[in-house]
Amino acid sequence: MDFTEKKIRSDYKFRGRIMSVRVDDALLPNGRPCKREVCEHVGGVGILPIDEDRTVTLVRQYRYPYETVTLEIPAGKMDQGPEDALECGRRELAEETGLRAEQMIPMGEIWPSPGFMDERLFLYCAKGLTQGETNPDDDEFVEIVRMPFDELCRMIAAGEIHDAKTVAAVGQVLVRGL
């Protein structure tokens, strides 16, 4: 069966710095008309730094949409114009944690919410870490948190970590044996 929906027309409702929102008129596979709300996102990168003794480095920060503080892997959006995911990952890792990595192991791409958003988030495992100075953005307030990888796994299993990129990155490390 062909599941393809055909876009007929797009109407942009908002254009922002990191995302735009549009409403499309489309046709379903059976030919019936429908509306689709789409959030276009610039994309991003998430990095799970793991040092030689299996300690991970995370960041604690306030997340406005959820009105709470989260614990998650270092990450950032591709907001420097057209940008290579690996370069973005190295930049964000250094900015948020001060870490530099000898190895940035690609762990694939995830689509955080494909029902309405086109965001592509690239995941990396950072190894061979050295500590340098942090350089957070002016609007970025983070606290660095280090813990054993097994503790992070326990927190995910206990439902204490809700951030999708963190859960996905840990899953990738486990299935890849990193």
Image (cartoon, helix red, strand yellow):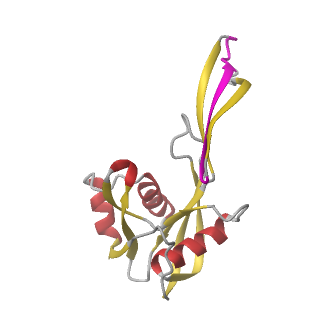
Prevailing SS of the magenta stretch: strand
Q: Who's the residue at 67% across and 11% down the image?
A: 30
The x and y percentages for residue 128 are 52, 84
Q: Who's the residue at 68% across and 17% down the image?
A: 29
Q: Nearer the viewer, residue 69 or 121?
A: 69
Q: Is residue 46 visible?
A: no
Relative to 31, 132 lies left or right: left
Vertical order, 67 against 101 (above or below): above
Asked if the stretch drawn in magenta spans residue 171, the answer is no
Q: Nearer the viewer, residue 94 or 57?
A: 94
Q: Nearer the viewer, residue 103 or 11?
A: 11
Vertical order, 35 against 168 (above or below): above
Q: How many marks?
A: 0
Q: Which residues are magenta?
A: 17-31
Q: Quadrant of the N terminus?
A: top right
Relative to 111, 158 lies left or right: left
